Amino acid sequence: MKRTEILIRQDRIVYTLLIVTAAIGLAWVLWRHQYLLSRSHLGTAAAPVATTPR
């Protein structure tokens, strides 16, 4: 293999990994958004609210 062929192959691998990582990140963001939306519609609070005694 020539040096340029090796570099082109390495670029292709890097770009593929970059796209896969971006797709996983996007899927995670969308899933998290849907999960938080479904929890807020169920009426569960994200964090309990402390009340002070009077």
Image: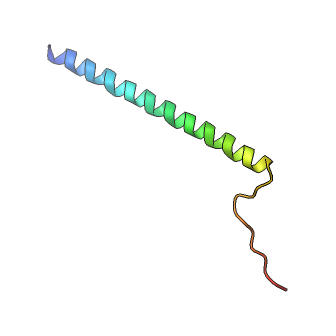
Left or right of 43 on screen, residue 11: left
Q: Quadrant of the N terminus?
A: top left
Q: Is residue 24 left or right of residue 12?
A: right
Counting the numbered discs, the total is: 0
**Percent coordinates x, y for residue 25 in the rendering:** 51, 37
The front one of 11 and 39 is 39
In this view, the residue farthest toward the bottom is: 54
Residue 27, given in percent of the width and then of the height, sits at: 56, 34
Task: Report which quarter residue 51 is drawn in.
Answer: bottom right
Position of the C terminus, as image quadrant, is: bottom right
Q: Residue at x 78, y 81 (%)?
A: 52
Judged from this view, the residue extending furthest toward the left is: 2
In the image, residue 20 above or below residue 43: above
Could you tell me which residue is drawn at 37 percent across and 25 percent down?
15
- The residue lying toward the viewer, choosing from 19 and 53, is 53
Residue 32 location, quadrant: top right
At 79% from the left and 49% from the top, the residue drawn is: 42
Tell me: 31 left or right of 49. Answer: left
Expressed as whole percent of the image width and height from the top left, the position of residue 33 reads 66, 42
- Using the image as rendered, state which of residue 36 and residue 8 is in the foreground: 36
The answer to whether residue 27 is above or below residue 2 is: below
* Image side of residue 34 versus residue 2, left or right: right
Quadrant assignment, res 26: top right
Residue 42, compared with residue 50, is above or below; it is above
* Figure coloring: rainbow
Q: Where is residue 2 drawn, in percent x and y?
A: 14, 14
